[in-house]
Image (cartoon, helix red, strand yellow):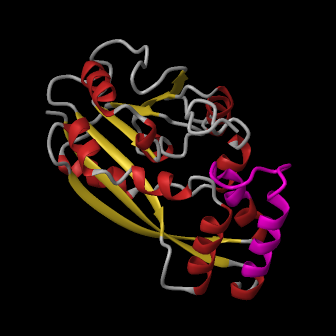
């Protein structure tokens, strides 16, 4: 693993990521349309698109999406995942240097990725690829960590086995970084959703987390054993319900 380097951090997690990470509810697209952030025929630029999960609801709604991703393994996994969508293409680039032409999109988004950005430089680049008054939306699928035995037990596992877990978990909620990026205090919308997972998919979700021990590492087997015990104690009919709260910070870039 490569510390906090976002460009390479997920290279060995791409397959688990696309298989197990939560999708984004389509309600987020409808909400942004109602807010005026999207219009018919719009192009969306997804910064740090990864395996394409954040791009998918916009493609389903008929928008073109350009995914920007520096990590080759993640970008190639996203290309495979979104191969059925002809209005999707990806480019190798970063939030601070997309390589895209000016005024090529109507909306810039980022899903789970903003905490890796340099906010002032990413803001400058977003303003460059947007027209004047163009919108941005930053999205996080936050796993609910309390309220049921599995949620609370899994959070304890993340603290026990996680490397820099607290740092990663809290960096994205920095109001100053959000204000730096938007040039104002953005609006906030939240959407609750639930995933039902079997043990195999839950194990893949843990394997996709860059802060947890990777397969092949000394701590991976103890993590999986602890996860299996927790799952067995909380599951019903071989499944658990994992609750998420999607947070969307959005505004025109000032």
Would you place residue 231 above or below residue 201 in this image? below
Is residue 126 positioned above or below 213 on the image?
above
Quarter of the rendering occupied by the C terminus? top left
> Image check: 175 left or right of 208?
left
Whether residue 34 is visible here, answered yes or no, is yes
Report the predominant secondary structure element of the magenta stretch.
Answer: helix
> Residue at coordinates 15% horizontally, 24% vertically from top-left?
132
Q: Is residue 240 left or right of residue 32?
A: right
Q: Where are the magenta residues, as a range?
A: 204-231
Task: Say if 148 sits above or below 111 in the image.
Answer: below
**Is 19 covered by the magenta stretch?**
no
Q: Position of residue 182 (x, y in %)?
A: 21, 38
Give coordinates of residue 212: x percent, y percent: 68, 55
Q: Is residue 71 above or below residue 216?
A: above
Q: Nearer the viewer, residue 229 or 84?
A: 229
Question: In the image shown, does 207 or 197 lie closer to the viewer?
Answer: 207
Q: Would you say 85 lies left or right of 139 here?
A: right
Within the image, what quadrant is residue 86 found in?
Answer: top right
Q: Quadrant of residue 63?
A: top left
Please state the total of marks drawn on the protein image: 0
Residue depicted at 22% across the width and 37% down the height = 180
Answer with the quarter of the image where residue 25 lies. bottom left
Q: Position of residue 116 (x, y in %)?
A: 45, 38
Q: Is residue 213 magenta?
A: yes
> Residue 238: in sight, yes or no?
no
Viewport quadrant of the N terminus: top right
Residue plotted at (53% across, 28% down): 69
Q: Position of residue 57 (x, y in %)?
A: 46, 48
């Amino acid at each position: 693993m490569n510390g906090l380097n976002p460009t390479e951090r997920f290279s060995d997690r791409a397959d688990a990521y696309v298989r197990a990470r939560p999708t984004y509810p389509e309600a987020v697209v409808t909400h942004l349309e109602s807010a005026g952030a999207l219009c018919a025929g719009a192009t969306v630029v997804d910064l740090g698109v990864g395996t394409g999960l954040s791009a998918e609801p916009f493609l389903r709604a008929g928008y073109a999406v350009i995914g920007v991703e520096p990590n080759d393994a993640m970008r190639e996994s996203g290309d495979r995942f979104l191969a059925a969508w002809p209005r999707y293409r990806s480019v190798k680039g970063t939030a601070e240097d997309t390589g895209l032409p000016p005024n090529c999109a109507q909306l810039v988004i980022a899903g789970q990725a903003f905490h890796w950005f340099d906010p002032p430089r990413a803001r400058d680049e977003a303003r460059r690829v947007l027209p004047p008054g163009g919108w941005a939306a930053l999205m996080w699928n936050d796993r609910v960590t309390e309220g049921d035995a599995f949620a609370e037990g899994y959070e304890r596992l993340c603290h026990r086995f996680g490397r820099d877990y607290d740092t990663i978990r809290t960096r994205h909620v920095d109001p100053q970084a959000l204000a730096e990026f938007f040039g104002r205090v953005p609006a906030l919308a939240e959407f609750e959703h639930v995933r039902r997972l079997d043990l195999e998919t839950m194990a893949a979700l843990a394997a996709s987390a860059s802060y947890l021990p990777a397969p092949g590492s000394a701590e991976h087997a103890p993590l999986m054993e602890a996860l299996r015990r927790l799952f067995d104690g909380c599951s019903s009919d071989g499944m658990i319900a994992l609750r998420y709260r999607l947070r969307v910070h959005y505004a025109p870039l000032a």
